Image (spheres, helix red, strand yellow):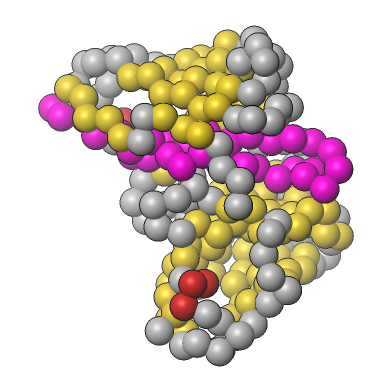
Amino acid sequence: DAGVTQSPTHLIKTRGQHVTLRCSPISGHKSVSWYQQVLGQGPQFIFQYYEKEERGRGNFPDRFSARQFPNYSSELNVNALLLGDSALYLCASNEQVNQPQHFGDGTRLSIL
Amino acid sequence: GQQLNQSPQSMFIQEGEDVSMNCTSSSIFNTWLWYKQEPGEGPVLLIALYKAGELTSNGRLTAQFGITRKDSFLNISASIPSDVGIYFCAGQLLGGTSYGKLTFGQGTILTVHP
């Protein structure tokens, strides 16, 4: 079975632009979470969605938004990009919110 | 944002040696998890712990959920070169605004010399 898949794998943007990152969960998983991982640190929680509803939000500005679709895939949107948004963005999925989360390989976002 | 206190930050060991790393928090968690991350990849789940005092093994890996629910440790026995990577602990607290959120440590970088 396919694991969590994310696209694109790499992305280069300039300050002020907008970006959309995509995630397909493991088949049968209804919950998707997003994390930001800055080089040298552990992942930081951004959002969790379950059954298309937001169930948790981390300490990120309103420039960050997300949604989950009926097929349980998800998008993370970031507006007005800043240099500090450069990071690896990870998506994780699980069957239920209290089950272990399984991660994709991430999207490497570089802001110039 | 909040992160767990994970130690050591890095380890350089010889192949065949045992490894221990731990994670502490000022808050309690319902679940502790240990992940391994290699360059260019996402974190891979190694072990999940659900009860205080629980001791769980996965091959050469053994992890424990601390009695206070504020700590966990991971042991790797008889290390091999493919154990190289960054090991992360993560705590999960179910309920309230933290529902489902994972809080990660800073990671332990493991290097194994053949």
- Image coordinates of residue B105 in percent, x first then y, are 51, 39
Residue B111 colored in magenta in the image: yes
Residue lying at 40% horizontally and 84% vertically, measured from the top left? A112
Q: Is residue B5 left or right of residue A91?
A: left
Q: Quadrant of residue B109?
A: top left
Q: Is residue B88 above or below residue B1?
A: above
Q: Is residue B13 above or below residue B100?
A: above
* Residue B36 in view in this figure: no
Residue lying at 50% horizontally and 87% vertically, measured from the top left? A15
Residue lying at 63% horizontally and 77% vertically, measured from the top left? A78
Q: Is residue B40 left or right of residue A17?
A: left
- Image coordinates of residue B111 in percent, x first then y, are 24, 34
Residue lying at 64% horizontally and 30% vertically, measured from the top left? B26
Specify start and end residues of the magenta stretch as a single range: B85-114
* Residue B55 in view in this figure: yes
Q: Is residue A72 above or below residue B37?
A: below
- Image coordinates of residue A74 in percent, x first then y, are 70, 65
